[in-house]
Image (cartoon, helix red, strand yellow):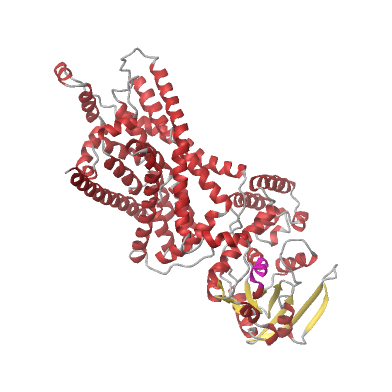
Amino acid sequence: MKKSIVIALAGNPNAGKTTVFNNLTGARQKIANYPGVTVEKKEGVCSHNGRELKIVDLPGTYSLTAYSAEEVIARDVILNEKPDVVVDIIDSSNLERNLYLAVQLMELGVPLVWVFNMSDLAKAKGYEFDLGMISSLTGIPVVRAVGPRKEGMTELLDAALKAAELNVPNYPQVNYGIEIEKEIEELMAIIEKRKEYEPFINVCPVRWAAIKLLEKDSDVMSRIKSQELIDYVKVARERLGTMLGEPVEAAIAGARYGFISGLCSEATKSTIEIRHNMSDKVDAVVINRVWGIPIFLGIMYLIFQFTFTIGEYPMGWLEDFFGFIGETVSGFWPEGSESQLKSLIVDGIIGGVGGVLVFLPNIVLLFLAISILEDTGYMARVAFLMDKVMHKLGLHGKSFIPLLLGFGCSVPAIMAARTLDSERDRLTTMMVTPLMSCGARLPIYALIIPAFFPEAQHGNILWLIYVIGMVLAILLAKMLRNNLFKGEAMPFIMELPPYRLPTLKGIGLHVWERSSLYLQKAGTVLLAVSVLLWAAATYPQKEFTEAELASLTPEQQQSETLIYTISGRIGQFMEPVIQTMGFDWRIGTALIGALAAKEVMVAQLGIVYSIGEADEESEPLRDSLKEHYTPLTGFCLMLFSLISAPCVATFAVMRRESNSWKWASVQFAGLTALAWLITTLVYQIGSVGNALIVS
């Protein structure tokens, strides 16, 4: 056991640090200067609970970025001399400004105690703090103190001794946004490779070093020996500056203040009128507990209207393009040819992949709108708003982020649940994530909605489908937390970054990253699946007798041919189960294809309805669906696609992230059963309602 515990006192100038230092050490002090500078160095000793304590008073500083000698000295003492615990003296009457240093101390990963000094002045200003909540959110002991009256000194020393003995800090990390976090990871990888050649980096956390390099901290930059690292930092800063539309250090500072704002919003109440800045005034409306959620739903409604209204034109162009390609390729064979190669290319490849790619404009427009909301800072507000709802459901506030990502793709959304510390929270979030309607389902909606519903209702129906998914996710999460995953949900800090104008480059990159995944699937997985589905819908081939050919119409021949194939036989086998939802065996074959990827359903329906009709007189797929089914069936097909088992990729990542075949199988089977039950109820009730209206 060490003979003495070293406690470093940190804090902003005028936060009362000197008063606390004098209270603890009394006359047992020595004062000198730090080597090479005129900055005062103060040390003292005291004893507590039988332990000798060495108190080091660090220079007062507003941050740990190298803008002054005081800042460099404060962090060098922490990094090089490694005190057993750092006690940050915080002027609680100016909390947000003082917490900026506190957050940077968290990033250093040292054992910390926060002392909310001047708490009497804070109370007089009308502030009330939930210290237990702050400690729970940050993992840092928090002590209330009034320095001039020596209040809280014993509690300070108790907390410091305990923190020094535990020495296992596990603080939440500030999330600097997708672009900056990506560069931080790249820098960390380079630093790890060069670590043995960089003496300075060996004494500090790798993530902290990467952040300081991106901030272009002059002191850290001067200590780096690797030219490769310096060159990479320069390029990374230029890239981020162009993308973000502001200096990197400003974006990093904004994210820290966003973290602080979220912490204060969770654990601070003001009992008198407090001055608000512009962001506060906007937030007073958009995250208002009454209007916040209706505003969010209204914005999403406008986005869906925008997606369909604008997307209709490029979709038509793509449909014409693939139709032209199909007719051109068909022209290489004599008219009326039944060549299997022709069918494979025209029906399987062009019809399958082209039938999916025509929905790319809808996906691009949807991601464009969501990227704008993310880059302005609004989505962080939505996360804060929904945090309150999450708590009521027993979910962790961080669950909203994976659920939000689920609107893009369930695979990265489930992986994003890694940020949740509680196993119960992680499993609950992963189980309900597929109910967030992913981008792969959008082609299904884009096919069915225009086929069965008037143009004025397109956005309304799409909005309704997304809302149904969110409501079901909420109800299912509540049920799971009350039964399978019982336990209290842990609170967390929701970061509120300042509003900013998004850059064209940043939005463009976000849209490209997400849309390119769809294009990659269309060119690889969907291409392979389309060919397999074409083969299943083509073989084995039925041979008709002359009598059968004479007695059957072309449509009947087509139906008999399809029933005889592998797809037809599977669909026939499924039909007794799925007909309760208004589906026939043709839809059954498409549902099988959707297990590979949801959007494959569109390709499979195209293959099913193009057999025997792939000539210049072919009717569009929407017309074929409208001819065979009712709007109720169309709605039920969207509903089943929304709720039913996720794709194979989602099943695989669920098994990996949960480390259990059990939970992956429960999710797969449970969502399929829930989809069948709800869709059956909707179809049966809808059918009765239609019958009553007709009668």
Total number of numbered labels? 0
- Where residue 205 appears, as percent x and y from the top left, is 65, 60
Q: Residue furthest top?
A: 334
Q: Is residue 479 left or right of residue 118?
A: left
Q: Residue at x 66, y 56 (%)?
A: 211
Nearest the viewer among 155 and 95 is: 95
Please check the rendered image and state whether residue 241 is part of the magenta-colored stretch, yes or no.
no
Image quarter of residue 552: top left
Q: Is residue 151 left or right of residue 680?
A: right
Nearest the viewer among 309 and 66 is: 309
202 shown above or below 299:
below
Q: Residue at x 36, y 20 (%)?
A: 342
Q: Is residue 417 visible?
A: no
Q: Is residue 139 visible?
A: yes
Segment tinted magenta in the rendering? 94-101
Q: Quadrant of the N terminus?
A: bottom right
339 shown above or below 123:
above
- Where residue 476 appears, as percent x and y from the top left, is 35, 58
Q: Is residue 173 left or right of residue 87?
A: left
- Where residue 597 appears, as percent x and y from the top left, is 39, 40
Q: Residue at x 36, y 62 (%)?
A: 478
Q: Quadrant of the C terminus?
A: top left
Q: Mainly helix, strand or loop, the magenta region?
A: helix
